[in-house]
Amino acid sequence: MKTKFKLLTRPWLEGLQKAGLSSWKRLAPPFIAIAAALIVCGVLMLFMNFNPLLAYQALFESAIGNKSAIGTTIIKSLPLLITGLAVTIAYRTEIFNIGVEGQILVGGIFAIWVGTKVSGLPSFIHIPLCMIAGMAGGMAYALLPAWLKAKRGINEVIVTLLLNYVAALLLSWAVRGPLREPGQLYAKTAEIAETARLPILVPEMRLHPGIFIALILITLGYFFLWHTVPGFNIRFVGANQRAAEAAGINVPKTMMTSFLISGSLAGLAGTLHIIGTEYRMLESFLSGFGYDAIAAALVGQLHPLGVLLGGFFFGALRSGSNGMQISLGIPSTLIYVIQALIILFVLASYHIRFGWRWWKREKQRDVFKQEIQSRN
């Protein structure tokens, strides 16, 4: 049991190099994709008779122009960072967890129940209890697709995508039924107790400890995947399941583990947004953030540390889009065009890179065959 969680120690720089972060070939694609998407979207703005330079200036000033804007960007980035990490961990076993959108909602429902129905607890107990409940909710909602994938080989994309709609209906039932605040015209839950709320560290930025929790989780996620035996098993299964089985790794168990970790992190993302920012749930709670987190993970090259780039960038887009619309009249929905273009360019970079590697291998094989023929 001691060797199961033994750290795979090596120098920090060497670890980064083996993880691929020291190579410009890994760092360049997301930056190129972002730049290309902004250029293409700028051309679209010209056709719409808008000045793209002024539009991007308004966008980024609204995202990082002052303390309040930075605070809003951080708040919107927080769910993307944790959920992006959830997507990354699942993908390391070749599991594409589209269901993070639904797992966020179910985790939030569990947390809001503890925050509103449980009372008489001190903050140092009530807050962790809400977080545990949210993680349990997200994990429970990931259990069915995890079992179907690991034990029956059923495609997780279809199952989790369908479960997202079920989660949205479950949220609608909760805010209109057992968790609804009495006497309110619009359907929403009651606010959680004061003892269940995270303290506000910087009032003008609405900054709470959740951002530090996210950064700690991302750091732990990196060390878990690249410096522990279970993390190595997860990456091994994702790289080659047959080889992992031959090496004695329990592939179904490893796949379920990564899937359930992913679900629990998604549930925690929803929980932190409740206990740190909203204090209640509406039917529109974090709508679309799960899908944005998938995009953020792709931009981050599906690496825990790369999720920082993708999470904060997409958080800035969401934060700055309203300012762009208010100041210049450009529809805030244009950010979804930018996001879609970024994803397309990132996926294109994957195909180009893998195509280049395949061409190089084929060329080496041809050279090797020619050498053998010449010797014969």
Image (cartoon, rainbow, N blue to C red):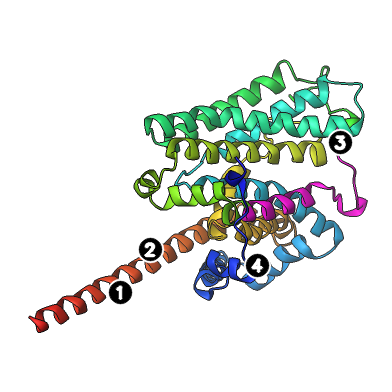
Q: Reply yes or no: does residue 189 show up in magenta.
A: no
Precedes in sequence: disc 3 or disc 1:
3
Q: Residues within 10 Å of mark 1 (few under 14, many from 20)?
A: few
Q: Is residue 51 visible?
A: no
Q: Reply yes or no: does residue 206 show up in magenta.
A: yes
**Residue stretch rendered in magenta on the structure:** 196-223
Q: Is residue 298 visible?
A: yes
Q: Looking at the rendered structure, which numbered label has been put on residue 12? A: 4
The residue positioned farthest toward the bottom in the image shown: 374
Q: Which amino acid does the dot numbered 4 rest on?
A: Trp
Q: Residues within 10 Å of mark 2 (few under 14, many from 20)?
A: few
- Residue hosting label 3: 197
Q: Are marks 3 and 2 in contact (CB under 8 Å)?
A: no
Q: Are marks 4 and 3 in contact (CB under 8 Å)?
A: no
* Helix, strand or loop for disc 4: helix
Q: Which amino acid does the dot numbered 3 rest on?
A: Arg
Question: Closer to the camera, 184 or 140?
Answer: 140
Between the C-alphas of marks 1 and 2, the distance is: 14 Å
Magenta-drawn stretch, dominant element (helix, strand or loop): helix
Q: Which amino acid does the dot numbered 1 rest on?
A: Lys
- Residue hosting label 2: 351
| Residue 357 figure quarter | bottom left
Precedes in sequence: disc 4 or disc 3:
4
- Residue hosting label 1: 360
Between the C-alphas of marks 2 and 4, the distance is: 30 Å
Between the C-alphas of marks 3 and 2, the distance is: 45 Å
Question: Closer to the camera, 317 or 56?
Answer: 317
Question: Closer to the camera, 65 or 269?
Answer: 269
Q: Which amino acid does the dot numbered 2 rest on?
A: His
- State the image coordinates of residue 294 (x, y, percent, origin top left): 55, 49
The answer to whether 365 appears left or right of 72 in the picture is left
Relative to residue 211, is residue 175 depicted above or below? above
